[in-house]
Image (cartoon, helix red, strand yellow):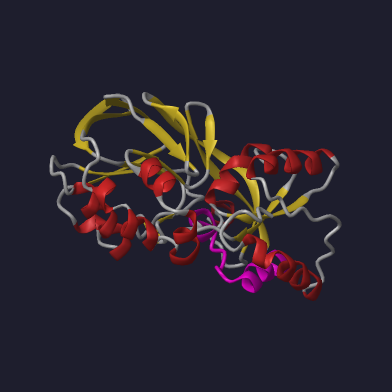
Amino acid sequence: MNTYSRKGEKLFFEALDLFHKYGIDIVASYPVRKPERLKQVVSEVISDGYRLIIIGGGDGTFNSVIDLFVHQDVVLGILPFGTANNFARSMGIPMSLEKAIEVIACGKVVDVDIGVINGQYFLNIATVGFSHAIISATPRRLKRYLGMISYLLYETRYLISQELFSCSITIAGQTKTIHTRQLIIANGSFYGARKITPDAHIDNKTLLIFAMETDSEWQGLKFWIGFILGRHLKFPESRLFKVQSACIVTDPFKYVIMGGEKVTRTPVQLSIDEEAIKVLAPSIFKDHDEDLSLS
């Protein structure tokens, strides 16, 4: 568990007690205080032969280690201890600790897709635009107590001052150019604790690209408020693309943020790696493989 993440340290021992309650035998536990050590710890336990690894943290935590699970015979269990927990929400994991552990005890293993940008894996959401400035500038204590709303309260000045950029999206040889201040690339269902589209799903072999096309300096604030209120698709400036692969070029170049970190920069090539990771999900999770077997 990432005990440096929001609520992680407080809930670590409570989680161990709940695992015992549900009959889950934890053979080793690691309260990782330094996030940069997390990937090393996970790599070591996979090398030791363990096949169910439960990780507690937020979206940044899971993004930092997910490449270790790709096409491996290792199952990931999720404890959502972050601010937004978009990945956990997309998997249908409850936000309460006990309910999340109940999923690990009573759920099912599913193979889900993950997104790839310039050869690097990402879970659920990647963004191009203002997100890194907001995440890096928001005080940690404010994030801890207010969660997602802290971004809006503390970073309004960032939201109304983001640079307008030109974005060309090429899909199956056809190019669409828009002017925007932020772009969302999604494999999962949720962004900011809201569904991106009503039919969004982490296991439907589809990437979503969402932006608002406008020159207005208020676009950033409108964009964020729209997501918080769940009305982002109702704006006439909204642009939504559903793709299996695409190429995105921006002018000027922009960094791509995955899990709160700068990972690569435009231009980028997007694709889906199908059935790439094994995850413990609730028994009601709609698995694409199950749909095919019933058809």
Q: Quadrant of residue 251?
A: top left
Residue at the image position 37 percent from the left and 26 percent from the top: 266
Q: Position of residue 178 (x, y in %)?
A: 20, 34
Position above or below: 262 against 140? above
In this image, 149 relative to 224: left or right? right
Q: Can I make out residue 208 in this image?
A: no
Q: Position of residue 248 (x, y in %)?
A: 33, 28
Q: Can I make out residue 276 in this image?
A: yes
Q: Position of residue 175 (x, y in %)?
A: 24, 27
Residue at the image position 65 percent from the left and 38 percent from the top: 70
- Please check the rendered image and state whether residue 97 is part of the magenta-colored stretch, yes or no: yes
Q: Position of residue 146 (x, y in %)?
A: 43, 65
In this image, 5 relative to 118: left or right? right
Q: Quadrant of the N terminus?
A: bottom right
- Please check the rendered image and state whether residue 257 is part of the magenta-colored stretch, yes or no: no
Q: What residue span does the magenta drawing correspond to? A: 86-106
Residue at the image position 50 percent from the left and 44 percent from the top: 259
In this image, 230 relative to 147: left or right? left
Query: Please, what is the dominant secondary structure of the magenta stretch?
Result: helix
